[in-house]
Amino acid sequence: MNLKRMFCLTLLIPSVSVWAQTDSATVDKVNTLTLGLNFMAHGEIARGGLPKDGDNVVEDKSNFILGRTRLILDYSRPYLQAHMVIQNQAIWGMSGNQTLKLYEGWVKATANNGLFAQIGRIALSYDDERIIGTNDFAMAALSHDVLRVGYEGHGHKAHAILAYNQSADNVYTSTYYDNGSQLYKTMQTVWYHYDVPKFPLGVSLLFMNIGMQSGEKENVSNPPSTEYQQMYGGYVNYHPKHLTLEGAYYRQGGKFVDPVVKQAGKIDAWMASVKATIQPTDNYGFTLGYDYLSGDDYVPVTYGGEIGLPWHEVVKGFTPLYGSRTKFYGIMDYFYESAYTNGFTPGLQNAFVGVFGCPVKKLDCSATYHYMAVATELHNLNRTLGHCVDLQAEYHFTKDISLVAGYTMMFGTETMDRLKQGNDNKAARWGWFSLVISPRLFSTKF
C-alpha cells in the first residue's frame, strides 16, 4: 500500500508543479482597484468681520461644525486610469443631503511617448495654486468638467484644457448658462512647464480664455451673450538646498460680467508676487514675501453703503479666479472670499513673514504675520487695512489621522471698517479645527 501511495504521489507532484508554473506564467494581474475614505470634521468659532445687512442689526458671530465625507474609488491598468470621488458635506444639524455630489469622476488614457488624454470632472491644480487650485480649505473645494490633453516627458509638461458648460440640456435655441455647478460658460487653458536639467529651476507659463454669460434669458433689450476675459502670465520656482525662491506675474484683460446687472465692461488688472522660504534643517524654517494685486479706481464709500453699486467702465481689480486663496492672503480669506461693500475691489498689498517648525515628533507648527493694505489710492483714508496673525498647529496621530487647529487675529484700521462695512472689523477673531481621517479601505489586484 505504501508503495502505491508513493507511486501516485510521485506522479502527482510533477503535475502540480507544471500547473503552478503555467498559472503564474499565463495569469498577469495588471488591474488594480482601490477604495478609500476621506473624512473631515471642521469647526469654526468667529467674531467680527461679517458685513452689515443694510440697517438690520447682525450678530457678528459664527459658530458651527461641518462634516465632509468622501468615498474615493481608483482603478488602473497599463495605459488607463479611472478615478471617482463622491462627496457629501453638511453642517451638523442640517436636514437632508442636498450637498451630495460627484466631486471628481474622470478617465485618463496614456501612451508610451508621454501623450495623454483625460476627460471628466477633475480637481485641477497648477503651480502654487494661485490661479488654478482645489481651494480645499473651503470644504466644498473646486473641480472642473473638462477635456485635458497633453504631453509629459524629458522635463517638459504641456497641457491643453477645454470646457463648455450648460445648466440644462437645452433643446431650444437658448444657450443661456445660469446657476450651474461650474463657474463659467466656456474655458480654454494652455499651461506649459519646464524643469531645467541638473539645475533646481522650474518655469511655467499659463494662458486662460474664459467665457462668462452676459445679458438675461429671453430679454430682448439685454439678450444673452458670452463675454471673454483672458488671464496670462508665469510662475518661477528656484529651489537650491535649504532655500526656495518663488515669483509670479499675471495680467487680466478682456471683458467682465457684472453679476448684478448682467452687463459687460473692460478689464485691465494685474498682480505680482515674490516669496522666499529658508529651511536650514528639517525642524524649522522661515518665510517672507510680498503680494500686489491691482485695484479699482476709488469710489467714496459712506457708512451703510448709501451710494449703491458703483459702475466702473474699466475694472482694475485683479481676481484670483479659481485659486486656493487661503494659501496666500491669510487663512481667513478676508479680502476675496468676503467681498467689500458695494462691489468695490480696492486690490491688496500683502507683506508677510512667518516661521514654521516641528518642535516635537509628529507636531508641525507655524506662525505668520501679514501687513495688509489696499492697492488703490483712497481719499481721506489711509491705505493700511490692518495687521493679521495666523497661528496653526497640526498633529499626525498616524499616517492617515491628523488634527489641525488654528487661530487668527485681525487688527483692522478705520479703512478696514469703512470699506468692509462690518461690525467690529477692527478686532476680528477666528478659531478653527479640522480632524482628517483618510484610511484605505480596500485594495486588490486582478
Image: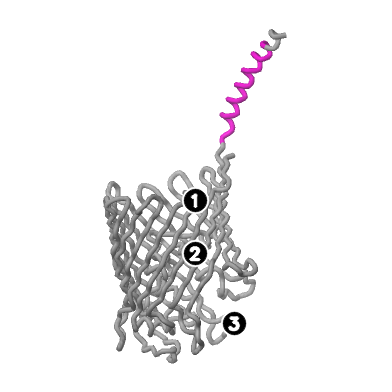
Residue 30 percent coordinates (x, y) = 55, 39
Name the residue beneath numbered marker 2: 142
Per the rendered image, the range of residues in magenta is 6-28
The one of 144 and 71 positioned closer to us in this rendering: 71
Residue flagged by tag 3: what amino acid is it? Glu
The one of 210 and 261 positioned closer to us in this rendering: 261
What label does residue 218 carry, if any? 3
Name the residue beneath numbered marker 1: 400
Say which label, 3 or 1, has the lower sequence index.
3
Say which label, 3 or 2, has the lower sequence index.
2
* For residue 162, above or below residue 257: above
Q: Locate residue 244: give its quadrant.
A: bottom left
Is 15 covered by the magenta stretch? yes
Q: Quadrant of the N terminus?
A: top right
* For residue 338, above or below residue 352: below
For marks 3 and 2, give the CA distance: 30 Å
Q: Secondary structure at mark 3?
A: loop
For marks 3 and 1, give the CA distance: 52 Å
